[in-house]
Image (cartoon, grey):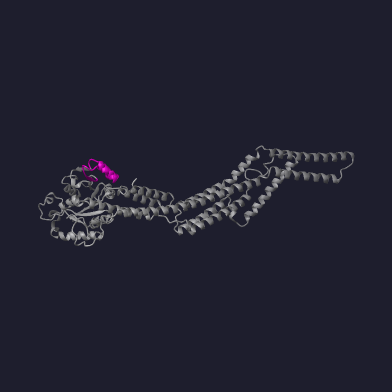
Amino acid sequence: MTEPTRLIHEGERWVAALAERGLISEQVAASLREAFVQARNERLDEAEDPLLVAMLCGPTAVGKSSLINALAAAEISRPGLGAETPAASIYVHERDDPARLFEYSQVLGRLGRAEASLVRHARDELLHKVLVDTPDIDSAVRHHRETTAVLVHCADLVLFVTSPEKYKTMQGAAWIAEQRQQRAIAFVLNKWDRDALGLQYVQRERLENDFRAVLAEVGFTDPLVFKVSSLVEQARGGVGGIENELPRLAAWLSAGLDRSLAGAIQQRRRRAAWGRLSASLASAVPTPIGGGNFVAQARERIARGRAQSLQLVNCEASLLALVSLEAGQARPRISGLLGGWMRLADRAGHTAQAVRALFRSRGPTGILDNPTFGASAAALLARVTAALAAVAVADRLPLGVVVAGWVAESQALSERLAELPAEVEAELASAVSRRSLRRGIGIGVLYAIEALLELVLVVAFWRLGSGFLSGDYASSGLLLNTAALLIVLLLLGSVAANLLFGPLQERLRRAAAKRAETVVAAHWERAAMLLEEQIEATDRLAQEGGAFLAEIDGSVQSLAPVKQADGDVARLFGEETTGAAQRQPVFE
């Protein structure tokens, strides 16, 4: 892989990485991708140019097809057919391989394969020089305009053909201004004969000066201008008695464009193309954010928000109530005095809880009043990240995909926490019916206490009954002792039930709090990780962008201009030159 090819590939990879991280908009990414397409069309990824591509461009009805026929001394393009004319014609030496045109452009390569568009010749003076007759720049056929716009990026040299009737058109002037300093441009003022000029024949010098003035307005202060007539008689020096520089134009294309000048033109075009690519990429280099105050502030606010979210979910978990389970559902269903006592205690607990909830609902509202579990913690994550995103926008810091990632994390946290209580309660429902040694011991203890309660009652009733029959009535001490013993056994049963089975309400709250802490910590951790990844990627891509631009500058510097051709090339690229008024045309 050549150095230019490597640069192009690395640049495309760099732009793709910028787009993936959201550091450039889709519109900017599309523009940069188009810049690389144009760079390939400019053959920046080719080490050497074996062919010099010269294109005839210009507005409608200025005689481009007739001119290329006159230059070729053969009819290779059919003039005057407007939209029916082939999109472009290529004039290639028979020893030049048309397949190489694919290295220049897919469009140019396809034209080189089309029999209707390709014309081979044997003129050795045009060896390694490709002439392309392009569609009109102001064509009514959209496809023709698009073809010219693509082909012009393949051109080393543009022969801009116009006529005394068309040289002042704004579209032509704008097109010239756009191509100036991008590629070499020589100007051909066609239809320079008595028949075409008509009444303006005597004012032809004024026409030429006016044409040069128009070119000066678009940056060509010392343009290379050929005044030609593509009529056969004029080309042979026949009728009309007017100067015709068609032979000089042909001589310049064949002999004046020697390898030295052609190489200088190609190098200057490459320098300009690399410069345009560098300017496009420079605007996309992100600002490093790793060493700024924003990063420290963001890390501190995320850490503080994480701690607050953990406190919030713990508070919310402490207020959770069972929905599908009853508080005593973990215990076995026991009939008798102990079972009735525990059911009565459960109902009393439910009543007290409802009363407390009623008073809380009438009190002042707060952050925990949201009916959805975890909504407050998720809202806090959303607020903290939104505030950080606003600071980044104000400071013009490239967060890119981080903002969308933060929004997604907030939504995911809200959804995950909302379903967590029902999930934990469902797991508890499955756990309460599962057999275990502890559950077996608990059931045995409760039934034993129930048996003791029944035994106490049986003994008490037996003594009361026997005393009643014998006339020895039971004392009040017996009743008090029996009541005290029953109360002790009931309390002992409640304690044993709570120790061995545990209240489902508390188990729900503990399990929900523990799991919510894990979920909240994970989402805040991912939010922080998104920021850290973006910081690392932004700083790395900024460094890569700077290094990439430095390599492009090195490539531009390596394309040193050919000194002896500097002045001539400057004229063709529309650059300022010294002694323009005294300069002789380069084709003489």
Q: Is residue 157 left or right of residue 418?
A: left
- Which sits in the foreground, 319 or 301? 301
Residue 524 part of the magenta segment: no
From the image, which quarter does the C terminus lie in?
Answer: bottom left
Which residue is found at the position 82% from the left and 44% from the top?
482
Measured as percent of width and height from the top left, residue 258 is found at: 21, 51
Give the residues drawn in magenta, as a range: 87-116
Measured as percent of width and height from the top left, residue 227 is found at: 17, 55
Measured as percent of width and height from the top left, residue 396 is found at: 44, 58
Residue 89 part of the magenta segment: yes
Q: Quadrant of residue 499?
A: top right
From the image, which quarter does the N terminus lie in?
Answer: top left
Asked whether the viewer can see residue 431, the reply is yes
Which residue is found at the position 55% from the left and 48% from the top?
522
Q: Is residue 410 left or right of residue 49?
A: right
Q: Is residue 340 above or below residue 376?
A: above
- Which sits in the foreground, 559 or 376? 559
- The tally of labels here is 0
Measured as percent of width and height from the top left, residue 454 is found at: 78, 39
Which residue is found at the position 38% from the left and 48% from the top?
10
- Which sits in the foreground, 465 or 75? 75
